[in-house]
Image (cartoon, helix red, strand yellow):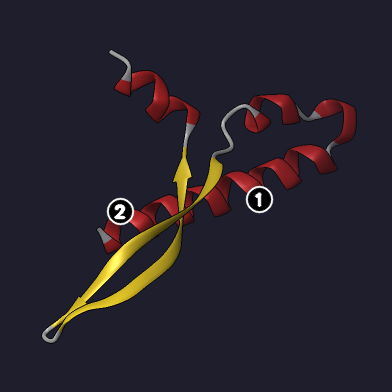
Amino acid sequence: MIRITFVKEERCFLLEEMLNVEASFGDLGDASLVQSKLPKKLKKRRAIVTEDGPAGYEEYVDYSFPEEAHTQNL
């Protein structure tokens, strides 16, 4: 789970940097192409379980990419 979250964070970071590069080109760049690939940031909670039992909840950020939403509907 941690590896998947790390990959999603890297992917989001790269897309944001790509958007900055495209925007810096002005009219020559195609920022709308990158904009359509940016994920939605979702705040989620997961239970923390210790040896003594439940220890509360942890909030984390998950990313929902448009391409993943289309493949899940198949």
Give, as a three-letter code, the residue at label 1.
Glu
Q: Secondary structure at mark 2?
A: helix
Give how far across and how far down residue 3 sits, in percent.
Answer: 28, 60
Left or right position of 66 against 29: left
Q: Nearer the viewer, residue 72 or 21?
A: 72
Residue 39, image quadrant: top right
Quadrant placement of the C terminus: top left
User: Earlier along the polypeptide chain: callout 1 or callout 2?
Assistant: 2
Q: For this view, does 55 lie left or right of residue 28?
A: left
x, y percentage for residue 53? 15, 79
Q: Position of residue 5 (x, y in %)?
A: 36, 56
**9 vs 26: above or below:** below
Work out which residue is located at the far left of the displayed protein and give it. 51
Badge 2: few (under 14), some or many (20 or more) residues near its Cα, within 10 Å? few
Q: Residue furthest bottom?
A: 52
Residue type indicated by callout 2: Ile
Q: Which residue is mark 1?
A: 17
Give the x, y percent position of residue 32.
72, 25
Disc number lying in front (1 or 2): 2
Vertical side of 3 occupied by 27: above or below: above
Q: Which residue is mark 2?
A: 4
Q: Residue at x 28, y 66 (%)?
A: 47
The quadrant the N terminus occupies is bottom left
Residue 37 lies in quadrant: top right
